[in-house]
Amino acid sequence: MGFYRKKSWLKKGLALTASLALLMGTAGCGSPAEETPSKAPEETKKEESGQETAASSGNAFEELSLEGVELTIWAPIYWVGKTMTYDDNEVWQKVQEETGVKLTFIHPPAGEETEQFNLMIASDSLPDIICTGWGGDGLFIGGRDKYVEDEIIIPLDDLIDTYAPDYKEAIEKVVVKEQQKDFYTDNGNLTAFYAISPYEEWCYNGILIRQDWMEELGLERPYTMEQYENVLTQFKEKKGAQSPLILPKTGIDGFSGVFMTAWGIGPGFYQENGTVKYGPVQSEFKEYLKLMNDWYEKGLIDKDFSTRDDDAMKRMMTTGGSGMIIHSPDTVGSWMNGVSPIMTGGYPVLKEGERVNYRLTNYQVRPQFSYSITTACKNPEAAVKFLNYGYTKEGYMLYNYGIEGETYNLTGETVTYNGIEYPLVEYTDKMLNNPDYPVLDAILTFKTHMGPFIRFEHEGNPALDMQNAEIRKALTEEADTGLNIPMTTLNAEEGKEYTRIMNQIQTYQDTAVLQFIMGTKSLDEFDSYVSDMKKLEIETAISYQQAALERYNNR
């Protein structure tokens, strides 16, 4: 039945360790041991009661059986090449077999996740567990504390202490101390099982270029705006690229802010020495728009970038229509397989030798596809123990790599992070060379890309080949993150207003930015645009982000 359903030496060891730690902590907290007799009788009784609870907590974990437990999970679905549900995923099938739990998945229609989430919360029919999908904590508008106060989800601190020893240990040992507070709300509640990475995962977004064209034209890796313009011009004039550069749909790279960050601003909210600002209303943003408009007029930017989906972008890159794109190296690398290797340009700067201070940052705590337990769950202890599975060795191996002997084999080698050894694997043809499942599809069918487990992105992503790994490593190491805002949370009052404000801001901004870039709105109207953004209350939204940052810093 597997490691997780046996009373293994590891589980016993963890339970004993937890009990001893609590016992020792009770005896040693606050005063030296020899001062213990002077304590008040009531205080002594409380400590003795705490010792008894601690001593029994390990046994409670061992004694709680998951066999036959039924849990419902509301979970947004994502897929690359075809429609699926979690029932189709081999790992989720195996997880149920190993733990004894029967899962029923409820999937909202793709594209309607937020709407369906709100309808579910407003209804009287909650599932046992809510998975946030890519929306992460942002799906809980107003912060998770609000949903605890409204009795939608439950705080998990005490339950995790008893029924999720592996998750607790991962928080304390795998995650660096300064990021451990990311697990908790502003009110100190632990409300979810997050994916945990044993390291900062490499940045997965940046400027990607056809390497064959660069080599054929004898071009060096670009860094400055002048160098980028030269590369794009050469692509247009010498390779016949009708759309040398494909911009993101909104005209702004919302992940790393490439090109924008050359002026020392972020693509959205960012901070300078603790003061929150909003990039698209800064005076420097006008300089970015001026450059993009100039390139657009020169035919260096795809005329139809605002309407391109991934399939259209893929066709442009693989057929010679484009030679540069802002995207994920994993995705574009798979597109270009057999066409051309890809390389990354340097983070664009105004002067050679400058260094960008903003990029996409992957924290060790990953809120995407986090799992929270609702007040409707009749057996929260079992739900917590079930979710703990992904932080055991058996669990994280299964989630990360699939089924041993089918999708992978052990190499016998290990890698060590924070004093913990993790096995290395070699994927089989089922994962890498499956005629029915391209690798991006195989990832979501035969393993789990993101979820409640210790996640090995670098070792466990079969789409991350040597070339893509080098690109992502460069994208991580060649920029700093001083302007980035950490994982802050808006409170309930702020969250409601913030959503209203940012909905109207985003609608207006997206339209105006495209007009500025495409030349249908003169840059002489930039000041009027900023004035309109202020009328739409962007300064109020900034103040909410400022308050959230200050609360975060005070956690």
Image: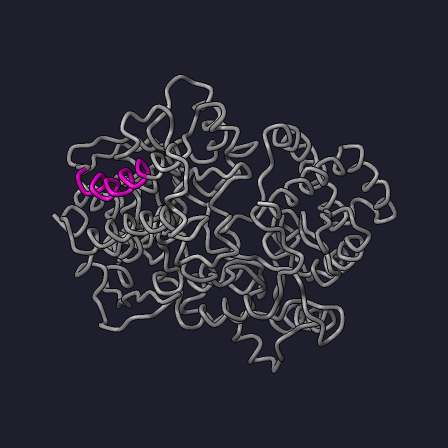
Residue farthest toward the top in the current orientation of the protein: 124
The residue nearer to you, when weighing 468 against 93, is: 93
Residue 530 is situated, as x and y percent measured from the top left of the image, at: 81, 42
Main SS, magenta region, reads helix
Horizontal relation, residue 40 to residue 14: left or right: right
Residue 533, picture quadrant: top right
Q: Image check: 177 left or right of 265? A: left
* Membership of 56 in magenta stretch: yes
Residue at the (28%, 51%) spot, across then down: 20
Residue 146 spot, x, y in % from top left: 53, 28
The residue drawn where x is 73% and y is 49% is 275
* Residue at image point 34% right, 23% down: 376
Residue nearer the viewer, 511 or 352: 352
Q: Which residues are magenta?
A: 48-63
* Residue 411 found in image quarter: bottom left
**Where residue 320 appears, x then y in whole percent?**
54, 65
294 displayed left or right of 153: right
| Residue furthest to the bottom | 218
Q: Residue at x 60, y 80 (%)?
A: 217
Residue 224 percent across, percent down from the top left: 71, 71
